[in-house]
Each structure stands twice: as structure tokens, then as C-alpha cells.
Image (cartoon, helix red, strand yellow):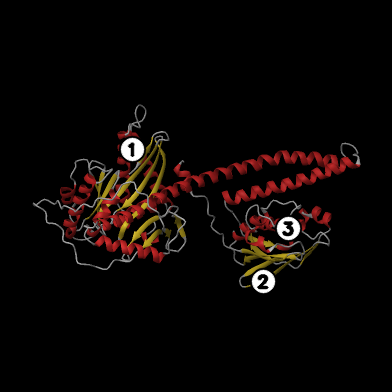
């Protein structure tokens, strides 16, 4: 059941897709998922049989952001349509704020549709937290098939209230699906605002509903303009597959007492309303990666399938034993709680993404602001050091030179912070041209000449080829690698740096070898992370960002970075640069967070 937070002006509502089995409910929710999450930012959770029909429910959390001063979140559910899962449908429907009733338009399925409609109405009247007067939208699906009932015939059978609207649809092609969703969502928001008096005085519930309608269509239009809607088969989802239970003798449905379509359903009363369940499931998507972990105890996929299969067998039995009722209730309630927590997790993810983006913006502005005073301090100290304002005493000149060294270190830190934030925020806009590495390295070494002379570094550059790459990116890469080789050189020997290139296997292997302090074994797995440095670098200044920038820029060419190191003997970094570089796609922060207006 949805809830209202008056203080935060938050509306959280539950929208349920109801109808016969294989009628198009899951496909409809998948189409909505494709509009709101075209890059699968939020996954659709499904619990399916081996035949891919919905067993327990599908679940999709949708965050609409702020509309009319209200923060609106929708939880989309589908119910299993098979008659043997009637108790499941009752549980999933509990607390619904609106229903999209999906009708299979085929003439041969009319009686099944009518029975499903009657079961929905019965469940709305008898389930806790629901009522039959909630917004209901009819979606006449499969309008592309032969031998279908006309819309007038369907209206005569299914429009049991004058305020109910109907929408023809072909769910597999996305036709009419979003129209039905928009209507149901706007109606449930209007009812929520009006029911709880949230718009009292200043806000008209109809205006809020119209704002929701307009925002939904704006989102849909943006997606459709950007690209054609992806086929349903290409929309990934988090799925739990469970085996179909062994068929048993069917349980005869009670015959109706008259010619009406009412089909009484045996009621099973859940044992206790507030019992908390220990959730032990771990959701995995079809690729095998973990999507969500709900507790410390994790069952394997085989364990989960086995447990659900046992529960399914219990569901098949007549609901005459209290233990069977308890087991069924426990299974459904646990999975509904799992879906609720999945929605809460997604809400927190959106909030964190929004905050991270704000921090990146602040970091960029901060480093820009730091550059101005640093430049002024460096200019002043340089003027003093060169004697333009008069000769300085030896202790004073040493102090000025120490200050200049500190300013240079601060400027390097600021540059690294700016580069790192640009990579995260703006991505890498690389332009691949023919780069003569000999000329490029000459420019880098000239920029580092003061550090090289101060430390007495011997640099050996072997014959370099011309490669296809981004000149700015390679300059940043060599500045960081050579800067590190100079800073972490041996304390008791002459620092030596060798730069050479090997060709083979469709890539250039650009190597930078030094005889420095090396990298301890325990530090290597985290070496390319931000602000990570070797444990043997104490007393040596550094930002901990250089190697992270190197890795990001090389990956931006479609390449990678590897290294070999021996503590006390030196390190060799290898840039694996493809002969034909490809721009790696930049994974920006999800625009969903910005659209949600958290």
C-alpha cells in the first residue's frame, strides 16, 4: 500500500497490472521500464517459471521526481494470471492505489477475462488496504491478432463503472501501453492528493495530476526522439527462475449459484499481520552479477529454486491445512518485502548519484578558484628568488625556494584534481590523430627539466614510432608516469628512466622503466584507485591521483595499463595502445538522478 508523508510532501503509490495469464501484463511493464530506464539504470525484478510466465510478481520502482511540489514514487507490480495462483493475486493486490486491468482481446478468452475481472473486484473488496472505487484503467491488448472482440463489445463486458477508460494496445510493440500507464498514474496521484487533503488551499489535485501527465509524456518523447524503442528482448531484467511444479489433479472450481459471472473463491486468512520475516534471498541478473543482497545469510540459486519449488507444491494443495496457509503467506509476504526493499535501495542509489554529481561540480569549481591565488603566490616568490626586489640573505632565499617547491606541489595537486573530476563529470572527448612520440616526449621532458636536473635523472628515450592517439591525453599520461619515476627514484643511486616501444598483436606496448623504490606486493591491487599510494612512499610528496588518471586516459583509447615491479629495483609500466584506437564509451552519472529532482 502506498503512503503519504505530509511533512516531506511525498506520495508513494502502488500500481498493479491485473489480468489473465499470458495476457500482456509483464510485457506492458517491460515497455514502461524501457521508457523510464532506457539504459537499464533500474532493473525490472521478475520471478518466473521455466516457461517465463509470471509466478509471483514483477516489480518496477519508478521515481517521477517533484511535480506540483510533491515528490512522487510509483511501485509497479504485476500479478500471476494463472487460475491456480488466485491466492497470490490477492496478496499482491493488497494495498493497490490503482489498477491497470489488461484484457486479452481474443474472442476465445472472453470467459477467462471475465473470471479474472470478477476475482479482481472480489479481491479489491475483501483485501486489506484496498477498495473497489480506486482508479481502474482497462487495457485491451493484442489488438493485432485475428478473431478479436471489438472495443464496443469489450466495453459492454468490462466497463463496470462509468469513470473507467479503456485503451487499445499491442504490448509487444509498445502501442497503447504508455497511454494506459499515464492515465492510471495521473488518476491515482489526483486521488491521493484529494483524499489526504494535501492540496488544501494552494494546490488543485487536478493540476497536480495534469503535471504528472505532462512530465510522463515529456520523458516518453525524449526517449523516443533519442532513439527507437528497443525491442523487449533487449531489455535486461533481474530474474529469478524457478522450476514449474509437477502437475497434479486439478481442483474443481465451485459452480456459480446463478448465471452471473461471480465465481466465489475459497478465502485463506493470513496468520498474523505484523510478523517479520528473515529474508535470505540474493537477486542475480541473467549475467550472474549480484543485484541485491538482503541479509547476511545468502542461499545459492539452487537453494532458492528448491525452496520456491517446495512452496509451489504447497500452493497446489487445497487450502485446508493451517500449515499450508502459513507457508504460502510466508513465501508471498517475503517476496513482497524483498521487492519493497529493492525499491528503497534504488531510491538511495538515485540520491547518492545526485550527491556525487553535486560534489564533482563543487570540486571543479574549487580547483579553478585555487589556481588564481596559487599563481599569484608563485609569481611573488619567483620574483623574490630571482632578486628583482633586491638581494636576499641566504636563509631568506632558502625559505623562498622551499615556498616555491610547495607551491609547485600544490599546483600539481590542483591539476590532478581538475583532470580527475573532468574524467568523471565530462568524460573523455578524445581526438585521435597521428602523434610522433619523439616530439611529444621532447615536450614532456622540457616541462620536467627542472625536476630532472635537480635529481640528476638520466633519461634514455629509444626510437619512437608515430601512433594514432590523442596528443593531450598522451601528454598527461607521460607527465604522470615520468613525474612518478622521478619522485620515487632511488635515494642512494642515480635515477635512470628508460622509455621504449614494442610492436605486436595489433597494439603498441609503450614501456616506461625506472630503477626506483618499487611497489610492495600488498599495494598493487589498489594502485590505480584515487588517492592510493604505495606503503613505502612515506616522506615523498604525491597526490595519489596520477596513476588513476593514466589508467582512465589509456582506457579511453580502448587500451589498458599493466606493470611489473620489484621492491628496491624499480618498476616498468606498460601502456597497451591499440593500433586503431576506439573511443571507449563514458559511463556518466545516471540522468535518472537529475530527472528525479530529489
Q: Nearer the viewer, mark 3 or mark 2?
A: 3
Residue 445 on image: x %, y %: 77, 57
The disc label shown at residue 503, or none:
2
Q: Nearer the viewer, residue 339 or 587?
A: 339
- Quadrant in which residue 216 is drawn: top left
Residue at far left of view: 258
Mark sitting earlier along the chain (3/2): 2
Q: Nearer the viewer, mark 2 or mark 1?
A: 1
Residue 373 on image: x %, y %: 72, 38
For marks 3 and 2, give the CA distance. 33 Å
Question: For mark 1, what is the residue?
Answer: 209
Q: Nearer the viewer, residue 443 or 53?
A: 53
Residue 34 on image: x %, y %: 39, 54
Q: Nearer the viewer, residue 151 or 366?
A: 366
- Quadrant in which residue 510 is drawn: bottom right
Question: For mark 3, what is the residue?
Answer: 536
Name the secondary structure under disc 1.
Answer: helix
Residue 413 on image: x %, y %: 70, 48
Name the secondary structure under disc 3.
Answer: loop
Residue drawn at x 66%, y 43% as measured from the top left: 367
Q: Residues within 10 Å of mark 3 (few under 14, many from 20)?
A: some
Amino acid at each position: 500500500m502506498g503512503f503519504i508523508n505530509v511533512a516531506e510532501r511525498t506520495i508513494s503509490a502502488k500500481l498493479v497490472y491485473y489480468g489473465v495469464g499470458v495476457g500482456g501484463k509483464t510485457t506492458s511493464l517491460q515497455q514502461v521500464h524501457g521508457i523510464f530506464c532506457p539504459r537499464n539504470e533500474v532493473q525490472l525484478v521478475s520471478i518466473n517459471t521455466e516457461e517465463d510466465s509470471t509466478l509471483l510478481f514483477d516489480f518496477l520502482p519508478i521515481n517521477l521526481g517533484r511535480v506540483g511540489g510533491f515528490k512522487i514514487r510509483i511501485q509497479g507490480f504485476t500479478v500471476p494470471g494463472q487460475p491456480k495462483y488466485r491466492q497470490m493475486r490477492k496478496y499482491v493486490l493488497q494495498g493497490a492505489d490503482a489498477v491497470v486491468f489488461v484484457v486479452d482481446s481474443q474472442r476465445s478468452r472472453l470467459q477467462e477475462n471475465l473470471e479474472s475481472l470478477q476475482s479482481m473486484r472480489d479481491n479489491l473488496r475483501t483485501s486489506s488496504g484496498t477498495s473497489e472505487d480506486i482508479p481502474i484503467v482497462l487495457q485491451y491488448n493484442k489488438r493485432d491478432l485475428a478473431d478479436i472482440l471489438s472495443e464496443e463489445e469489450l466495453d459492454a463486458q468490462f466497463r463496470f463503472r462509468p469513470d473507467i477508460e479503456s485503451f487499445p494496445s499491442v504490448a509487444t510493440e509498445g502501442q497503447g501501453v504508455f497511454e494506459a500507464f499515464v492515465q492510471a498514474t495521473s488518476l491515482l496521484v489526483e486521488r491521493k492528493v484529494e483524499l489526504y487533503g494535501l492540496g488544501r488551499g494552494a494546490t488543485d489535485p487536478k493540476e497536480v495530476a495534469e503535471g504528472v501527465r505532462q512530465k510522463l509524456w515529456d520523458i516518453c518523447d525524449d526517449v523516443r526522439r533519442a532513439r527507437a524503442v528497443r525491442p523487449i528482448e533487449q531489455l535486461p531484467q533481474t530474474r529469478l527462475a524457478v522450476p514449474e511444479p509437477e502437475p497434479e489433479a486439478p481442483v474443481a472450481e465451485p459452480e456459480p449459484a446463478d448465471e452471473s459471472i461471480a465465481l466465489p473463491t475459497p478465502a485463506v486468512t493470513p496468520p498474523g499481520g505484523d510478523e517479520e520475516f528473515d529474508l535470505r534471498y540474493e537477486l542475480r541478473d541473467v549475467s550472474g552479477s549480484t543485484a541485491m543482497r538482503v541479509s547476511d545469510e545468502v542461499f545459492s540459486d539452487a537453494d532458492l529454486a528448491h525452496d520456491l519449488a517446495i512452496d509451489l507444491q504447497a500452493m497446489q494443495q487445497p487450502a485446508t491445512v493451517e500449515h499450508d496457509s502459513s507457508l504460502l503467506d510466508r513465501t508471498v509476504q517475503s517476496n513482497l518485502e524483498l521487492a519493497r526493499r529493492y525499491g528503497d535501495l534504488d531510491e538511495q542509489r538515485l540520491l547518492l548519484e545526485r550527491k556525487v554529481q553535486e560534489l564533482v561540480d563543487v570540486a571543479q569549481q574549487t580547483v579553478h578558484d585555487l589556481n588564481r591565488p596559487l599563481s599569484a603566490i608563485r609569481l611573488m616568490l619567483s620574483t623574490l628568488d630571482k632578486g628583482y626586489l633586491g638581494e636576499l640573505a641566504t636563509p631568506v632565499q632558502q625559505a623562498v625556494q622551499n615556498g616555491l617547491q610547495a607551491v609547485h606541489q600544490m599546483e600539481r595537486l590542483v591539476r590532478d584534481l581538475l583532470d580527475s573530476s573532468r574524467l568523471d563529470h565530462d568524460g573523455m572527448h578524445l581526438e585521435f590523430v597521428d602523434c610522433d612520440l619523439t616530439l611529444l616526449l621532447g615536450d614532456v621532458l622540457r616541462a620536467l627539466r627542472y625536476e630532472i636536473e635537480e635529481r640528476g635523472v638520466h633519461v634514455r628515450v629509444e626510437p619512437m614510432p608515430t601512433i594514432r592517439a590523442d596528443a593531450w591525453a598522451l601528454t598527461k599520461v607521460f607527465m604522470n608516469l615520468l613525474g612518478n619515476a622521478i619522485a620515487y627514484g632511488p635515494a642512494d643511486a642515480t635515477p635512470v628512466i628508460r622509455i621504449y616501444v614494442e610492436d605486436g598483436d595489433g597494439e603498441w606496448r609503450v614501456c616506461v622503466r625506472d630503477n626506483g623504490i618499487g611497489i610492495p606486493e600488498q599495494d598493487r591491487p589498489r594502485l590505480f584507485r584515487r588517492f592510493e599510494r604505495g606503503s613505502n612512499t612515506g616522506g615523498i610528496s604525491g597526490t595519489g591521483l596520477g596513476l588513476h588518471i593514466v589508467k582512465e586516459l589509456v582506457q579511453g583509447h580502448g587500451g589498458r595499463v599493466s606493470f611489473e615491479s620489484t621492491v628496491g629495483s624499480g618498476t616498468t609500466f606498460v601502456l597497451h595502445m591499440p593500433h586503431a584506437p576506439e573511443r571507449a564509451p563514458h559511463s556518466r552519472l545516471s540522468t535518472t538522478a537529475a530527472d528525479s529532482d530529489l
